[in-house]
């Protein structure tokens, strides 16, 4: 089955730095979503994008739905310790098997 | 309002045993899903349901069965557990926007 190409695989940053991660696909998706997963927990929805070119913010998080509908990025500004975790992108195809297609995740680590 | 709940949190099975993973939601959502997450990977869809009495296969359905007799509950059944089914299982739901899914806390299953 298809998986989205998510990069980078991991990021080591200093507190206060900005973070950028992205997700690409060989096929078109109609919806892009970004989730955060803490250890031992389920994914928590951060941002949902429904329209090509859409730019949406949620506090310090900003995500964009690529014009080609084959990519999306997530930015986190001024990172703080609680941002540590694994970030997943997911795509949904209208008329597909109704499930989401996930990337493998970006592991964000904040160095003291 | 508990959202999506899953039981048990952890379980160890012997090869060949069977068990049912429980999922319940109080959001009155029609759509429900089961995913599995293997180490270092994104989530993959096992089964989904668009409403009570209606279920369909996802990407990786082999070795699993589901039923949906009520809107609230969507149990996942493993009949003959195999080591390949060692994984973390997540239940999810979606409402009016089918493409926007909300996840439970997960069940960590080990088959020895």
Image (cartoon, helix red, strand yellow):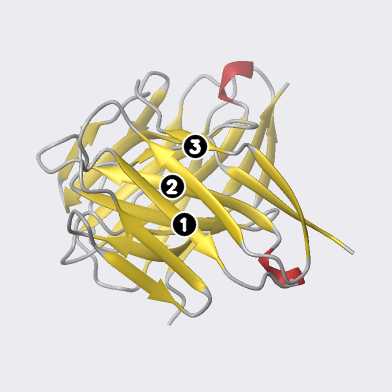
Q: Which mark is residue B41?
A: none
Task: Evaluate if marks 3 and 1 touch, with contact meaning CB atoms under 8 Å apart.
Answer: no
SS class, disc 1: strand
Q: CA distance from mark 1 to mark 2?
A: 9 Å
**Pointer 1: what residue?**
A74
The chain letter under disc 2 is A
Q: CA distance from mark 3 to mark 2?
A: 7 Å
SS class, disc 3: strand
Tell me which corner region of the image, top left, top right, bottom left or bottom right, holds residue B7: bottom right
Residue drawn at the location 43% of the way across and 76% of the way down: A58
Labels 3 and 1 positioned on one and the same chain: yes
Q: CA distance from mark 3 to mark 1?
A: 11 Å
Q: Quadrant of the N terminus of chain B?
A: bottom left
Which marked residue is nearer to the observer: mark 3 or mark 2? 3
Label 1 Cα neighbours within 10 Å, binned few <14 / some 14-19 / many ≥20: many
Left or right, B5 with respect to A100, comes to right
B79 or B25: nearer the eye?
A: B25
Q: Position of residue A19 (x, y in %)?
A: 61, 58
Task: Evaluate if marks 3 and 2 touch, with contact meaning CB atoms under 8 Å apart.
Answer: yes
Tell me which corner region of the image, top left, top right, bottom left or bottom right, holds residue A3: top left
Q: Residue A40, relative to residue A26: is it above or below? A: below
Left or right, B60 with respect to A38, comes to left
Task: Evaluate if marks 1 and 2 touch, with contact meaning CB atoms under 8 Å apart.
Answer: yes
Is tag 3's residue or tag 1's residue first in the polypeptide sequence? 3
Q: Which mark is residue A89?
A: 2
Is tag 1's residue or tag 2's residue first in the polypeptide sequence? 1
Q: Position of residue A106 (x, y in %)?
A: 60, 44
């Amino acid at each position: 089955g298809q998986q989205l190409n998510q990069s980078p695989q991991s990021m080591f940053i200093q507190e206060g730095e900005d973070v950028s991660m992205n997700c690409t696909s060989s096929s078109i998706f109609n919806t892009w979503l970004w989730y955060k997963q803490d250890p031992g927990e389920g994914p928590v929805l951060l941002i949902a994008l429904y329209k090509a070119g859409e730019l949406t913010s949620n506090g310090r998080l900003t995500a964009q739905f690529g014009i080609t509908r084959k990519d999306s990025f997530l930015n986190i500004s001024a990172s703080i310790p609680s941002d540590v975790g694994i970030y997943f992108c997911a795509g949904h195809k209208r008329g597909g098997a109704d499930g989401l297609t996930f990337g493998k995740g970006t592991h964000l680590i904040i160095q003291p | 309002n508990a959202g999506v709940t899953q039981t048990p949190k952890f379980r160890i099975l012997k090869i060949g045993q069977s068990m049912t993973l429980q999922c319940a939601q109080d959001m009155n959502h029609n759509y429900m899903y089961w995913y599995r997450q293997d180490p270092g990977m994104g989530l993959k869809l096992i089964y989904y349901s668009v409403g009570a009495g209606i279920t369909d296969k996802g990407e990786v359905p082999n070795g699993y069965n589901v039923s949906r007799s009520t809107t609230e509950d969507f149990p996942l059944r493993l009949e003959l557990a195999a080591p390949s089914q060692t994984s973390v299982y997540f239940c999810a739901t979606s409402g009016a926007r089918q493409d926007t899914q909300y996840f439970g806390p997960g069940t960590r299953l080990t088959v020895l």
